Image (tube, rainbow, N blue to C red):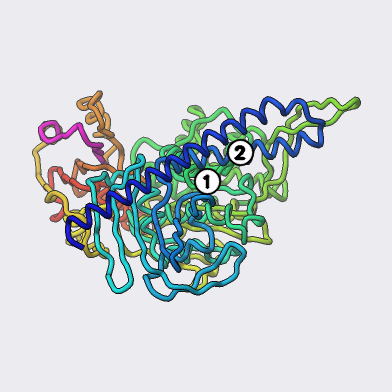
Amino acid sequence: MDQANKQAYFEHAQNNLNSVIEVIKETLEKTKNNVNKLKKSLHTFNEDDKIVQGKLLEMNKEKLEELDIMQDSPYFNKCKINNETIYIGKFSLSEQSIYSWISPIAKIRFEHPGQVTYSLPDKTEKTGTMQSKDQYMITGGKIIYLSTETLGNPRELVYQDYFSNQKKSFVLPEIVSQMEKAQDTVIRANYKNALLISGPAGSGKTTLALHRVAYLLQSPDVSDKFNPNKILILVQDAGTKEYFSQLLPELGIKNVAINTFPDWAKSVLDIKDFHYQNSFGNTELERDHFSFYKLQILKNLSNIKYKKDVFSTLEQVYENLEESYKEIFAKQKQEKILDKIDLTILLKIFRQSNDSLSIMQEYYQLKKKGSSLKKIGRFPISYDLIIFDEFQNYLPEQIKIIKSCLNTENNAVMYVGDMNQKTQLGTINDWLEIGENLKEERKVVLNKVYRNSKEILEYIKKLGYSITIPDNIKSGSQIIEKTFENIDEEIDFIKENLNQQVVTGILIRNYAHLKNYQEKLKNTKNVHILPMDEIQGLEFDTVFLVGIKKEDIFSSQRIEIKELRQEKEKIDKDLLYVALTRATNNLFVLGTEKLSDII
């Protein structure tokens, strides 16, 4: 196809898109009117009819949300089969022949022009000839990418506009529309039992897992097995929770609980007056040793009665600690701080004392004459599905405790993460530790990295990390590695090279330097200054990895306990890998020593 024909093809596709969007807008207005009419008339129905009308109102509200999303991006695939046109999009609109990506017929988008077999909505199989297939990326009602392939002609690019690679803006077009057949198979895999989705940083594993959740909740084949109110997604931090909360509605997922472990534990234990820290201590060395001894106690926990005063319970648990660590815990108690191990111990004792886990919930008690009284009580916890995001950072005991809340009929749990990105002590090493015997067909490993530029991946590979660099990956800037005499020189260099038009991360291993950077660079637009152990799941256009010094980056050297030192050595290396993979385009590595000399 020459350039003139490509331009004509693109213009025809954009005009067709405009027509579809007009129909969507008309349908949107009609649905809005229906919602308003139902709202106004709801009070006129008797109680039985009111239930039916209420459900109808909810269905119309859901359709309204879907149409609102569709008017920006109605579809991402168009197939012509037996001269009939079929579109695939995020949601369905039957009058325009747009089918949801979760419908059986949507699998047709992975085929090439020629003889194809596909499933109709009633599950009957049909064979036909696919004459052509177009793939789109549409945002804001505009085509920014279009390719086509036809019988006898391979796929060719018709149009491509410049578009951002930023995660928040393009997650759905990037993942749903460019999903590979193997990934679609993962999403549709049998719903029962454990499933592992693993891969290096930036491989798309988390987003793939969320699409599986969307499929399980919306597919007619399995949706009756999963109640959104009985699904738990566990994430590492509040930032990831917020990101997921924005993404899930665009996938049609509502009412699913997204929680961090401390917040979930807090709701189960019904404790309010405390602050959470991942670990406690004045220095990294002190935190590591204190955590190590707490972990030994967790593994050999004796029968202790759970008390409402959680610090009193923990005092009993830690009564055999050395005096120096008892003093640290006394300070922790005084500051009302609980860490991950404390909460895990409390959950384990709570479960032993009550035989199972329950949660505080509001409920209504019917009184005479039809009135009701709002009360609060404990109810057993039962989940149809649990997802552990970054599972490699969970203690085996944490996972076992949370899994005890699984509906045994489904036994559906997803582990999403990478054993090569362990950043915390005492976490899972072996599947048998949590009672899992994963079969090979339930292990999905994604090898390609899509987040980082070619130069960044090549630099990481030269440092000795085992990664696969995909073909045709984007190119970026060369990595800049520089040494300085002190922190002030580093900060001056950053100020000179900072581009405030892009999101920048300044990542530091040594907590002692953190405040210095925060003070010198405060109020700087689009700059996030973070410790290296709080960056998992984040990404930045530009990263300054600062404070490179062997004794800081490889802190395990200072540890004398052999078992602890060996575990910490792996964490040091994994933590560095996580930091290096946060940059999408530009990476600066700064310190008093060159990273390539100390690794």
Q: Check disc 2 and report the residue beneath it.
A: 60
The three-letter code of the residue at mark 1 reads Gly
Residue contact between numbered discs 2 and 1, judged by CB atoms under 8 Å: no
**Is residue 375 magenta-colored?**
no
Q: Position of residue 185 (x, y in %)?
A: 47, 66
* Residue depicted at x 25% and y 45%: 163
Vertical placement of 585 versus 529: above or below?
Answer: below
- Dot 1: element: loop
* Residue depicted at x 72% and y 36%: 53
Vertical placement of 382 versus 309: above or below?
Answer: below
- Dot 2: element: helix
Q: Residues within 10 Å of mark 2 (few under 14, many from 20)?
A: some
Q: Position of residue 367 (x, y in %)?
A: 87, 27
- Given residues 239 and 80, the one toward you in this image is 80
- Between marks 2 and 1 in the image, the one whose residue lies nearer the viewer: 2
- Given residues 450 and 396, the one toward you in this image is 450
Residue 439 is left or right of residue 537, and the answer is: right
* Image quarter of the N terminus: bottom left
Residue 225 is left or right of residue 265, and the answer is: right
Q: CA distance from mark 2 to mark 1?
A: 14 Å
Give the image quarter of residue 598.
bottom left
Whichever of callouts 2 and 1 sits on the residue coming sooner in the sequence is: 2
The three-letter code of the residue at mark 2 reads Asn
Q: Check disc 1 and report the residue beneath it.
A: 252
| Magenta-highlighted residues | 493-509
* Residue depicted at x 35% and y 52%: 174
Q: Is residue 324 visible?
A: no
Residue 497 is left or right of residue 180, and the answer is: left
